[in-house]
Image (tube, rainbow, N blue to C red):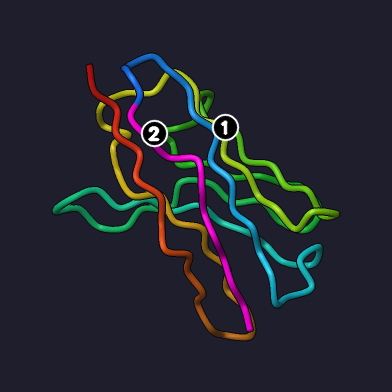
Amino acid sequence: QVQLVESGGGLVQPGGSLRLSCAASGMIFRFITMDWYRQAPGKQRELVASIDSGGRTNYADSVKDRFTISRDNVKNMVYLQMNSLKPEDTAVYLCHVLLRGFHYWGQGTQVTVSS
């Protein structure tokens, strides 16, 4: 079955960097668009970045020029490099895939940006 497992979250100071990873299984990974979402307390879940099978990327305006999504089709991994982090980036970050009409989510990894 489809599994998504995130890692790499933590506590970081404003201006710092983190790299999130998502290990995917149970799908033909190289054909699938992969997404990173985030959810902050009291806020709606927000699409942060996407990468399609051809490597084309899209970003939320709030993270453009600071975050970079990438994928490794050999390791079945998707990454989110986050630079110049701000307190408003604090959230649970979730890996997501839409496959055959079903939404699959990882368990999430907490990112906290605070001094």
Q: Secondary structure at mark 2?
A: loop
Please name whichever residue, 81 or 3, is drawn nearer the observer in this view of the structure.
Answer: 3
- The answer to whether residue 102 is left or right of residue 113 is right
Residue 3 among magenta residues: yes
Q: Quadrant of residue 45?
A: bottom left
Mark 1, residue position: 81
At x 39%, y 33%, the residue is 62
At x 53%, y 24%, the residue is 65
At x 43%, y 40%, the residue is 9
Q: Residue furthest left?
A: 42
Residue 72 among magenta residues: no
Q: Looking at the image, is 76 positioned above or below residue 110?
A: below
**The N terminus, quarter of image:** bottom right
The prevailing secondary structure element of the residues shown in magenta is strand
Q: Nearer the viewer, mark 1 or mark 2?
A: 1
x, y percent for residue 39: 30, 53
In 3D space, how far apart are the residues under numbered discs 1 and 2 (Cα atoms)?
A: 14 Å
x, y percent for residue 47: 43, 53
Q: Give amino acid for label 1.
A: Gln
Circle on res. 13: none
Please name whichever residue, 9 or 103, is drawn nearer the observer in this view of the structure.
Answer: 9
Q: Looking at the image, is 101 positioned above or below residue 24?
A: below
At x 62%, y 40%, the residue is 69
Q: Which badge, 1 or 2, is on the more N-terminal residue?
A: 2
Q: Residues within 10 Å of mark 1 (few under 14, many from 20)?
A: some
* Magenta-drawn segment: 1-11
Q: Quadrant of residue 34?
A: bottom right
Mark 2, residue position: 62
Q: Secondary structure at mark 1?
A: strand
Q: Give amino acid for label 2.
A: Ser
- The answer to whether residue 96 is left or right of residue 115 is right
